[in-house]
Image (cartoon, coloured by chain):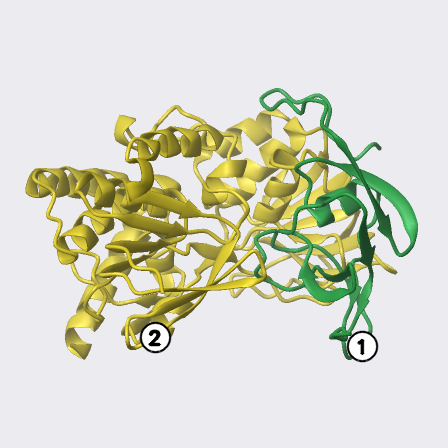
Amino acid sequence: MKSCDVLIIGAGPAGLMAALSAAEAGASVVVLERAVRAGGQLVKQTHMFFGSREQYASVRGVDIPAILLNKLAKYGDKVEIICSCTALGAYEDGVITALWEREKYLKFKPESLVIATGAYEKSLTFPGNDLPGVYGAGAVQTLMNVHGVRPGNRVIMVGAGNIGLIVSYQLLQAGVEVVAVLDAAPKIGGYLVHAAKLARMGVPILVSHSVTAAYGKDCLERVAVSKLDEGFKPIEGSTVYYDVDACCVSVGLSPLSELPAMAGCGMCYIPQLGGMVPVRDEEYETTVKGIFVAGDVSGIEEASAAMVEGRLAGLYAAKRAGFAHEGLDTLAEECRAQLASLRGGESGGHIRAGLKLLSERGERNA
Amino acid sequence: MQQRITDHPILSFPERKRIGFTFDGKEMYGFEGDSIASALHANGVRVLAHSERLDRPRGFYCAIGNCSSCMMEVDGIPNVKTCVTPLSEGMSVKTQHGKGVLQ
């Protein structure tokens, strides 16, 4: 059994920031990461971030993990990051089990826990959606930007949210033809600055359209695309076919919230936040004392917001473990102001609505 | 088209060490830093497994070790998530049919 003040599960943007603020507060920190390297999904994000300086705006996502790891290195052996280590369970007695390198079991009993496990890509239901060649858009981004391998030669993108738009542009950068970007909704969901870049490159963005079937013998060879009516039903006679060897599905993310559910944290279904999310208070503590959450696991947003949430959750988790940061109140206030700014405007409307619903439901269930 | 990206406006992919492995007995190579699935993809292999009930082809999907679509038999061990498992020298990688069997 290993002990530490604060255990953090997930070394993505939220987890690394949580580690940083807990270490700053004086706590000993262990971070578990199931991938071979820290950074979460930042490792494939070659685009520059928006937001403000505090969330590394104008820095490419792929460069952020090194910056954070560098800051963490200052704390020496007070911070340990264990990669290739999958958390397996979080139990009522506060024990967390993990499997390292597929062969060694580890047990932890921390004073407090931050769950920052992130999210996974949703899939879409259509005949043939299981054919090799139908891939998650984020997965394709990893294949290209981390491994340097193209997913195919001709790709169709399903979903014109930010991930769909950004990955389409990155496919073009990798030398792949993007035949079209589809979205079932009647308007483009992502930022227009990303959509405009694609339009300038001649990629059609078809709203009120979706893929209705995929065909191929062993791998994807062709997709059927239909125009949708106001009820999202395919319009008869509108079907066209595209010969493609890859189809990227970018229809949103779901929180990876199994661990807080297993630990007994109160959970709520909040559509605006991507699905089942843990109920948490203003200090990012769940209904189980000592268990905190941050980032996509508690609601799907962008990496910028995940970093700020991680900063906050790390501060409060350290406090719970007996290490109150001397500048806690000022820092927390700054972070809350940053979050309010990131969630401001029209594009943050659904997040604000989701968080409001979560807090109402949380209070009702308390 | 060559599946390896060589020219990219933002990223650079410098020469890396070659890593030899076999896929269903056939010799192939990838590079240091590859996952098993990325190396296979670069070699044009997209069918990684077959489903349990209907024997339908299965490939890469999520690349974060979550969806279980890419599980293969590696060095005799079934259900290895090839999208997140690093390629290493001399690996024997085999197409998995169904659940796989522990030896």
Query: Label 2 amino acid?
Result: Tyr
Residue at the disc numbered 1: B54
Q: Judge by depth and name the residue closer to the eye, A311 or A47.
A: A311
For the residue carrying disc 2, how many other residues have a C-alpha within 10 Å: few (<14), some (14-19), or many (20+)?
some
User: Does residue B10 appear in this view?
Assistant: yes
Q: Residue at left 17%, top 43%?
A: A336
Element assignment for label 1: loop
The picture places residue B72, in percent across and down from the top left corner, at: 75, 61
Q: Judge by depth and name the residue closer to the eye, A178 or A9.
A: A9
Instruction: From the image, state the color of chain B.
Output: green
| Cβ atoms at labels 1 and 2 below 8 Å apart | no
- Any mark on residue A91, and which? 2
The chain carrying label 1 is B
Q: Residue at left 12%, top 43%?
A: A325
Kindly indicate the quadrant of the structure image that contains residue A285.
bottom left
Disc 1 and disc 2 on one polypeptide chain: no
For the residue carrying disc 1, how many other residues have a C-alpha within 10 Å: few (<14), some (14-19), or many (20+)?
few
In the picture, the quarter occupied by the C terminus of chain B is bottom right
The picture places residue B70, in percent across and down from the top left corner, at: 70, 59
In the image, is residue A273 above or below residue A168?
Answer: below
Query: Label 1 amino acid?
Result: Leu
Kindly indicate the quadrant of the structure image that contains residue A119.
bottom left
Q: Judge by depth and name the residue closer to the eye, A115 or A124.
A: A115
User: Does residue A347 appear in this view?
Assistant: no
Residue A45 falls left or right of residue B102? left
